[in-house]
Image (tube, rainbow, N blue to C red):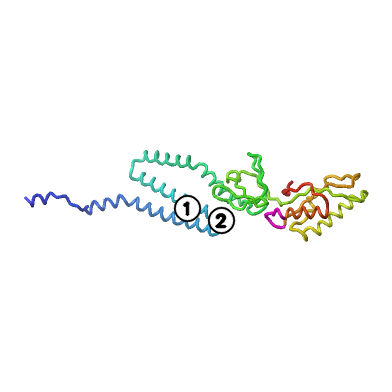
Amino acid sequence: MSGEAGGKLPTAFISWKELEELLWRALPAILILLVLLVLRFLVNRFISAMHTRKVLSLSVKYILLKVVDYVIILVYLSCLLYIYLPTMPILYVVGLVSAAFILIFFYDVREFLAYFYIIASKYPRGRPVVISIPRYSYRVFGRVNEVHMHGAEVEDFYGNKIYIPNTLLASSITIETPVLVSLRVKALFTDRSRISEEISSLVDRMSKEISQKIPFSFDKESSYIEKIDVDRGEAMLILRFKPLSLPIKRSSTYELTKYIISNYGEVVYVEVVNGLD
């Protein structure tokens, strides 16, 4: 009785033949996983090297590493489905997942591609530029400090931060230009018959004195005479000054205005302009 019952007990162990068949079936999945892990390692090393060379910022490096992981997982799952399930359903599943990914991350993908376009086009970072965005009739006058994954940080010449999406920055018209502080000055002259000579003398004196007193240099080329009233003995001058350092401190602009008022005439208005204006 006991011998007959013992002969009917099922074995608790898998046979070598069954184990060998299972390993052979799992071998493609294991090989694909190893290949993808090696590929992930090489891509991550490349991204880290780009970050070390300061081509990529830390935030962009982090996002790229996450994207690589998501792509590796998606590719691995697609390969498993293709190997172990019928072909046609796989195409539908992969297509559905890809379409969902594109729809969900559409704007992120656009900003991501625009980011690489900006990097590849060697966008003038850290230099004074005028950024014109035609679609919005908008102009930004400043310098691009940093380009991140979703947008660029632009600093105007008072130190204010402006953030522009990469897609807008990539489609904008960017022109490098010097920074100028423009003053409209009303100057009075005692000798009305020699106003032109006195203006030339004032400009020469300004060229020599300004940079020694305050952190600006006088730009004679872009300065000009707006109007001369001989009867009143006055002239309206547009005077342009280059800042010796950026960003421009408001205290420095005030110091420039105060100095002009004390030595050359009445300041009507002050504004920061670009060299194209």
Name the mark on residue 65: 1
Which stretch is magenta? Answer: 244-251
* SS type, badge 2: loop
Residue shown at 29% from the left, 52% from the top: 23
Residue labelled with disc 2: 55
Q: Residue furthest bottom?
A: 212
Q: Position of residue 85 (x, y in %)?
A: 33, 42
Closest to the observer: 53 or 180? 180
Give amino acid for label 1. Answer: Leu
What whole-number distance in Å separates the C-alpha atoms at marks 1 and 2?
A: 15 Å
Q: Residue 28 — which label?
A: none
Q: Position of residue 186 (x, y in %)?
A: 83, 48
* Residue 231 lies within the magenta run: no
The residue shown at (64%, 42%) is 133
Question: What residue appears at the point 54 percent right and 55 percent down from the top-left corner?
Answer: 57
Side of 93 where 12 appears, left or right? left
The kind of residue on which mark 2 rests is Val
